[in-house]
Image (cartoon, helix red, strand yellow):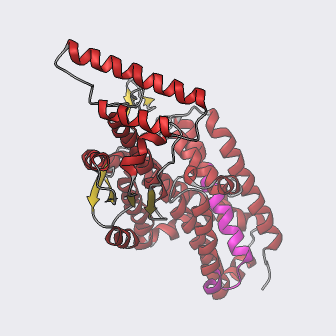
Amino acid sequence: MQALIALVRAEIKLHFSNRRAVLMSIVAPILIAAFFGSLFGSGSKMAGIPIAVVDLDDSPLTRSVVAALRAEPSLKTLVTDEADALAQVRAGKLRAVTVLPRGLGERAGGAMFGGAKPEITLHYDPSQTSALAVVRGLLAQTLMQEVSRATFSTAGLEKMQRQVRDATGLLAGHRDDLVKMFDAIGKVQHADAAASAASVPQAGLSLPYTTREIEALQSGSNAAPVAYNSYAHSFAGMGVQFILMSGVELALGLLLMRRLGLWKRLRAAPLSRSQLLGSRVAASALISLIVFAIIYAVAIVAFGVRVQGSPAGFALVLACFSLLTASFGLLVAALGRTPEATRGLAILATLLMVMLGGAWVPAFIFPEWLQTLSLAVPTRWAVDALDAMTWRGQPFAAALLPSAVLLGFSALFTAVAIWRFRWEE
């Protein structure tokens, strides 16, 4: 046992003696996490989605629609011609272009009652599909209000009555019912005009509800809601990435020991195989845990990250992932041949695990099939568990399954590493 402790102490001392490498292993994830946290934070919301509107109809209705879109604070609306708008979308300067066709003002009202529907074209940047959904919803709301305002004015009702009477695609009974409906609306409007100076309301039809948006926040120690901190996820993701990278570096150190003949000297010492490999795993796990703790300490002090869930669960996840890092490094050392060839493959494998684990961007924005596939990599469980223990504020029980999965991967990596480890050169 004393020999094992001595080996672990020597490994840790050797690792932290390289101050520049240690400093970079701590500073790099903090800087990148700070960048991603500020990029996706609630305080950096887009002021307005840049779009363009092309009004080919130039009717009172379309002019009202354009004015309403330009007044919408969620959009930055440019009125231009179609060729210029398309060029700006292709260049990435605009997210989408709405083309209002000729005849929209003439046919939009009748389309509400079975008439031919005019076609509005939406050109959009294929990399900005989320912006398309916003533009589509705002356009539908604006058109509904403006078309209903124009349709249910006095002149609009008279026009609609004529269109309904001339419509050949309507059943006779339906046509008569619609005409009677317009007559009734007209009588109400004339009665209102005679009773007061105000004539037909100008607002038109609108959505039959309003919304109140409330963030589902966790409660702090004083039972007051704690604001969401986007840095919590970014520090989890970048911490996972760079801790795994440190595991790769420790594996490369073992390969260098083989090349320099230091491994033969250790093998000649009165040390068992379990002591030799166990000391590497224990030292790597402890180093990873220390570095991870320092990264989160900076996140807590400088960026306001809080462990809103179980502190014990948070510590358990960090410990299990540190052990996973050590076993992954041992696996890399067992499968690798030379430091040069192993470094590239190990970094590629690490980046794939980090990417699939949702360290760069949250896994919930992945396609459904990729979300399912990402459960096969340990980084997904680590990042989700750290999120659960920090900004999601989940209890200790939420850390048990991810920790068990991380331990399972650690056991698998260790077993394969021992099986494939080359004891003799």
Q: Is residue 322 magenta?
A: yes
> Which image quadrant: the N terminus?
bottom right
Which one is in front, 236 or 190? Answer: 190
Magenta region, mostly helix, strand or loop? helix
| Residue 256 at x, y percent in the picture | 62, 82
Q: Is residue 414 above or below residue 394?
A: below
Q: Looking at the image, can residue 10 be seen?
A: no
- Magenta span: 320-342
Q: Residue at x 45, y 39 (%)?
A: 163
Asked whether 339 or 157 is in front, the reply is: 157
Looking at the image, residue 183 lies above or below residue 24:
above
Q: State the quadrant of the C terminus.
A: bottom right
Identify the residue at the far top of this view.
Answer: 195
Q: Is residue 180 visible?
A: yes
**Residue 245's spot in the image, x, y percent?**
55, 68
Left or right, 284 with reference to 125:
right
Q: Residue furthest left?
A: 197
Residue 211 in the figure: left or right of residue 167: left
Q: Is residue 347 above or below residue 218?
A: below
Task: Write down the quadrant of residue 316 in the picture.
Answer: top right
Judge left or right: residue 118 versus residue 363.
Answer: left
98 in magenta: no
| Rendered residue at 35%/31% (across/down) | 152
Say which residue appears at 31% left-offset and 31% top-offset: 153
Q: Residue at x 47, y 27 (%)?
A: 179
In x, y percent, where is residue 274? Answer: 76, 63
Task: Between residue 153 and residue 224, name the one nearer to us.
Answer: 153
Q: Residue 76 appears in which quarter of the rendering?
A: bottom left
Q: Is 153 rendered above or below residue 61?
A: above
Label count reads 0
From the viewer's side, name the closer residue of 168 and 8.
168
